[in-house]
Structures are given as C-alpha cells and as structure tokens.
Image: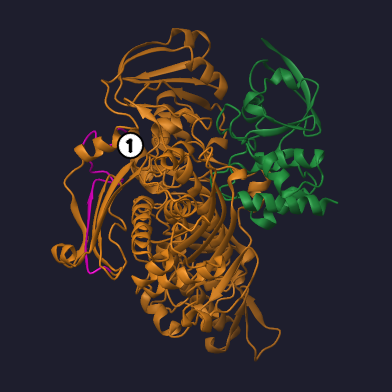
Amino acid sequence: MERTISFTLNGKPASVTVEDDRMLLWVLRSDLGLTGTKFGCGEALCGACTVIVNRQAVRSCSVPIKDVAGKHVMTIEGLGQSGLHAIQAAFVKHHAFQCGYCTPGMILNAYALLLKTPKPTAGQIAQHMEDNLCRCGAHTRIVDAIEEAAGGAR
Amino acid sequence: MKPADGLSRRELLLSAGPGLFLCFGVDSLAAQEPARLPARQGYPTDLNAYLRIAPDGRVTCFAGKVELGQGAMTVLAQILAEELDVAYDSVDMVLGDTGLCPYDMGTFGSMNVRNFGPALRSAGAEAKAILLQMAGEQLQAPVARLQVKAGVVTDPNAPGKSVTFGQLVQGKRIERHMEGVAVKPVAAYTIAGHAAPRKDALDKVTGKAQYAGDFALPGMLHARLVRPPAHGAKFLDADTSAAEKAGARVIRDGETIAVLHERPDLADRALGLVKARFERPAPTMDDKTIFDHLLKTAPPLRDAGSSGDLAEGEKAAAAIVEETYLNSYVAHAPMETHSATAMVENGRATVWASTQAPFSLRQQVAQAIGLAPQNVRVIASYVGGGFGGKSAGAQAIEAARLAKATGKPVQVVWNRAEEFFYDTFRPAAVVKIRSGLTSAGKIALWDYKVWGAGEREAKSYYDIPHQRALSAGGWQGGNPDGMHPFAVGPWRAPSVNTNTFARESHMDTLAAKAGVDPLEFRLRHLSDTRMRRVLEAVAKQFAWKAAKAPSGRGAGVACGIYSDACAATMAEVAVDPKTGHVRVKRVVSAVDVGLAINPDGLRQQMEGCIAMGLGYTLTEEVRFKDGEVLDRNFDSYQIPRFSWMPKIETIVIDNPGMAAVGAGEPPIITMGAVIANAIHDAAGVRLRQLPMTPARVLEALKKG
C-alpha cells in the first residue's frame, strides 16, 4: 500500500510516499540517494546494509519502511557529521578495511555495540560483529579499531 | 631450532607493531636497480600519460590499475611521490578510467607494483629531471646545485630564491622529454618502503566511496534479468504481461529478458511476476562425482617441469608413497556483487563497472553494442573486492545493451544468487603424487600430476634428483567442453592454492614416514636461500620445537612460491574430537616479496590472505547438481567470520636488493597445507580433501 512514512533521518525530519512494504535499504539508496548503505546479500546474512534505528543496529535489507515510521534512523552519512566519529577515526588509523564495501555496516554495528557496552572486551567485540561479513580479511584490525574507539571515547 | 647464521647476523629489528620488520643488507643495490627497469614496457612513453601538476602543486597520478581494496591507490601514490620528490599528501589518484588513464591489461596476479611500478617510477624520474632543468633556467643556477623537497626547488647559493613544480608547469603538459633518466636508488627512499596512510580511508569510513552501483543518473532504470535455473538449461518461453502490468518495462532480445524499473527493488518484484519456463539439462554430475569426471574429461597431461630420470628415482627409493589430493570449486564471493551503471548517448557509451580489467571490458562493451572502442569509456571506481572474480564483466555488457535498447541509463546489480551462479569459480582439482624416499630419508622420486587446477607451481622447488610435474586443464580456459560444469577463472593465486596444498601435505607425509621433524625435512631438501630464510624467520617467531609428527601439539608448517614471492607459514590448531571442528588458534607467516614498497599495506594483504584462506581450507566448497548451483547465499556458503580469527603474526622480510614482486597472494597459498599439517600433528589423521569440514574431520578420526 502506498502511503507517506515520516521518520527522523540522520537528525533531520524525512518523509517518503512509497509502497510501505518496501525495504528500508532500497528507499535509502534509491529514493533518498544515501548510497553509503550497501547491498550485499538481501537476506540479512552479511551486515553490509546495517543502519541504526532507535539506537539498535538493524539489517535495512529486511526492515520494511513502514516499521521505521516515527523512529530515528541513522546511516553512515549521519555519523560524524561534525568531524569523524571516534570509531571512524580508529578505522582510519588501524586501516581496518580493504575494499571498504562492508565498512559502513561494520562501523554502524560497532556504534550500536558501544552504545550498549561502552567498554567491550575483544571477545565481546568479536561476538557482536560475528554476523557482519568481510571478505578481504580485515577482521583483526576491525576489532583493534573498535577497542581503541571504546578507549578513546572515554 | 637454531636459526641459520645468515639470519641471526644480519637481521635488524626496525619496527614492532602488528608484525616484525626484518631488514637485510642493501649492498650492490644502486648498481643493479636501473638496469633491471625496462622503461615503461607495454605502457605509454609520454610521461604526461601518468601525471599532471596543477598550479597549486597538487599532483594527479593516472593509472589503469583498479583499487580493489588491495591498496593500489596508496602504493602507486607512494611510488610517484618518491620519484618526483613531492609530498605524499599532495598526490591525488585517478585509477581505472579508460578515458583518462594509460592502458593497462588488468589488476590481477599481484602485478601493480611489479609491472606498472617501473613504468610509473620511470615517468616520475623523467618528470623530476625535466622540472629541475626548467628550475635551473628560471633560477639561473646549474641543475647539479639545485635541491628539491616536497615539490619546491631551491638553490643553496641563493637563499630565499625558490620555485615550485606547480609554478614551473602551471597546470600544462610537460612538453620536454629526456631519455634514460635514472630512477632513485632504493636506499634513498623516504616515502616508498615506509608506512603511509591509505588514500581511500576517508571515503570508505564516511560512506562517500562510490562503487559501480552507487551512481545515479537522471532517468536511470534498474534492470533485473530472467536467469536459467541451471547451467545448460534451455529457454522455452516466458510470459511477462504481469510484470508489465505492475509498471515495469520489459525488454526481450532473444532469450534475454530484462525487467526495468526506476526503483531497484520494484524491478526485482516485477521480475518475480515473470513466468519463464526452462528445460533442465540431463543429469550430469554433482560436487561428489566431479573428481572422477575431471579425470575422465581432462585433456592429456602436459609437462610442467621435469628433471632427472624417474626410473633412476624408482631404483633409489627404499619406500614409495602414493597419495591423492582433492580440492573443490570455490567462489570469490566479494561483498560487492557484480555491478554496473551504463549510459549510451550520441554514439558514445560510459560504463561505471566493478571490474578488475577496465580496458578489456571497454573492448567487450564496444563489441556488444556496436561502437568503436574509443567511443566507450569504462570507469572502475571503487571496487568492493575482486580476488580474480571481477576479471569477467558480463554485468557491464548487460547494462550497456539495455541502456542502448531503452535509450536511458541502466544499472545492473547482480543479487547474491546471481553472483554465485555466474561466478568464475576456482576450479575443482585432483592431484596424484607418487614419491620415493631413500633409506637415508631423502626424496629420490617425485612424480606429480594435477588435473583441473592448472600448472603454476606444479613443479616442486625442493632439491629432488628425479622429478616430473604434469598438468591437465586449468583455470585459464582451453578445457574440453563440459570438463568444468561452469565457468572457472582466476581465484586469488590461481593454480597455486591447490598445488601448494598437495605438495606441502605430501612433504609432511614423507617427513612422518622418514621420522623427521617436518621443518627439518623441508630444510634438508632446500637450497633456495629466500625460501630457507622465510622458513627460518617464521620458525623463530613461532618458537617451533622440532618433533616428529604427530606430536599432539597441533603445530603445522607449509611454504610456497607465488609470482616470485616466497611465503612460509606456521599454525597451531585444536581439533574437537566430538564435533570434528577445527579451531585455528595462531598463524605466523613470513614473506619475501623483494622490496616492500608499503610494509603495512603488505601486512594488510598477508592478514587478508590468512583470514580468507581459512575459508577454502575449512568450509568453502560450491555445492552443485546437474548444472544447478545449490549455494545461493551466505547461509549455506560459509565464509570466515570474526570468531574464526586466529592470533595473526606477520613477518616481512625486507629484501630491497630485489625488485618488488607480487604481494597480494603469498600467504594464502600455504593455508590449506599448514592447517592440514597442524590437524595431523594434533590428531594423527591426514585430510587430503579441501575443505576440511567437521564432517570430513570426524570421518578421518573414525577411520583413525
């Protein structure tokens, strides 16, 4: 059913008039032009499309747009709008990426972790990041970067 | 064990951090270096093809290479900044754009630094020499007296007088030319050979990095195509009326049926409304029967390197050991699926594509839509992983054809199932080795046959008096029809993952048979100094303790060569006897890639190799039946995850006396064997088929 969905996007009011069962990923990428959120698998299996909805990391390829009505959505474009966020800075410093395609999802999933658990152990980080896939093999640097961001943010 | 004398005397610890940096002498370097550089072989002779200097001094570097994540952007900027004597931060990179960059055959085989590097160095050196000549004229000083730092030329005899490269060139082409300018000696490097911040970092952490599927053009349509259910299926007919009723545009061209919509997900929904019928192929084979099929259908074995006389080897052997090794089809599975955005207008086409080979793709696109190649521009912006799988660019041809047919820009982004279906897999393979040991525990005979994988590194580098390597069929094409049931192609270190797994597993089998420590056994058969050096370096870092395998500790060793780079790896594993699950606890790897232009970039590649290598070693195999690819997503096809990661230690043997060779692959070739050997050391069972899944490990444990 086509209807108007209003929500907060990266701190600003947003509203789209679309089929309400379309997935958030495609509305973000195609209707709203925010291409930092990536398509990887389409079935919530890889985490490339991870965004933050009301402080939780969600897989935007599997969240219908109607589910975010009235909620706060944050994409990679909304993080560190006034200078790099500590997680982004740590990813830069540790070279915690190679091809970069999984990186927005990694960073936002880490962001959700640090909201809940500000000082995670390396084991907690790995556990929380487990279902975000990286094919280039930057895993150990990603864990190092998140650990540093957690320390540096205090 | 005691390190070789050469290592302990000459090694010098330069930096700690995530890995060690060992430095060796730079003697005779200056004399050898220029002679080794063929000036821009296969690349343009005009230096303006490689660089442009803006009035503000910023330097734009043009290269036909592609940033796949391997750090091409960074390492090429280092090379140019070094040679030109400008600040690394002042260099901007333009990569993979056929409209702007010098021709390049493609980004694969770890050839960025090896092949393009010398051309770029030479262009940078020529440009700097010309700029100094121009500066000498302007400052009225002899060139020999001038000094240059970060693009500013000064005359020590005239303090306060200076001129910048930007002022000299003023954004124009450099019209002068100089022949035979020597490049900088490696010993004088201050930028290359040192760590550098990645050029792509800010784009990638902020989401600004644009991949081929991120380009949006006015009026653009997203296309989804009808696909057969299996390779070899025959198209019968299709009813597209429901898709059209739902507001999608349908293009039919023979058996190609595309559904297009302004929104990608709505194109996908409309595709779901198309009723297409296919006739499935007759039953052929599956992932279990493939190995017999390969042996039956492969072309005749061809010589891939032999020496000595096998009959003599048979005579000298006191014991014969024969084994068969199997390897499966493996997918590239980059996180970014094949993507392209195409625009065809006024007889010209522009295609943004995730490709490792923009120039060959330009030819293919031109041919497909009937344009001259010079009227087609292919732009490989950021590419979300390649690993060899983006050498083929069928998605870009689909997008270009549909853009021509609709008169609108068209984007094609394969979904994950299409990515698995059309991937050019690493080929499945069979290796048979017949070997003989003398009563003194030396290898006298080595008869190696490989079917399916390809001949690279099929010949052993161990000192074996009588050996033969034969190879039949491979990843490069030229296989008989139907030998591989789907497309195969280069997969990170093509041929060499399989050949290294077989050779290094077999070396351990022979070491156990001879009752000798597997490292010692290798060293006894090695005179190659570079290979000895990486083995000794890794053993020292790992704190390898000599023991006859299986020792119960779960320690393994393997080494190998890819593209003139040497790698040695040691691993520690634990095997769960109840589940068959293998936990890789620690991996230490050492490489010698000659001069390391970017040591941290090299370490990133090594870590990536170790992480990615865990996949083909432990879980990854493409399952298929009668042309249907059964793995369609990451639920059944398991790639390495965070919890799998071992403690990783990397050692870069800096060897600046040797020109830089490929650095993107070396450790990955050792992963299959080092884990197989460690499993044997832990549990006393030998697995000779990859991947070593829990089920296969359990089966081996049961057999004992």
The range drawn in magenta is: B464-487
Q: Residue at x 38, y 73 (%)?
A: B37
Q: Residues within 10 Å of mark 1 (few under 14, many from 20)?
A: some
Q: Chain of mark 1?
A: B
Above or below for B137 versus B403: below
- The x, y position of residue B406, in whole percent, is 44, 23
In percent of width and height, residue B674 lies at 45, 55
Q: Quadrant of residue B442?
A: bottom left
When asked about the image quadrant of residue B462, the answer is bottom left
Amino acid type at mark 1 = Ala
Residue B71 sits above or below residue B5 on the image:
above
Q: Is residue B223 visible?
A: yes
The colour of chain A is green
Residue B574 pos. (x, y %): 55, 49
Kind of element beneath mark 1: loop
In magenta segment, residue B474: yes
- Pinpoint residue B581: horizontal percent, then vertical percent: 53, 41
Chain B appears in which tint?
Answer: orange
Q: Which residue is mark 1?
A: B487
Closer to the camera in the image, B56 or B515:
B515
**In the image: residue B161, left or right of residue B698:** right
Residue extending farthest to the bottom is B157
What's the magenta bit mostly, secondary-structure-wise? loop
Q: On the image, which quarter does residue B77 sit in?
A: bottom right
> Is A66 rendered above or below residue B493?
above
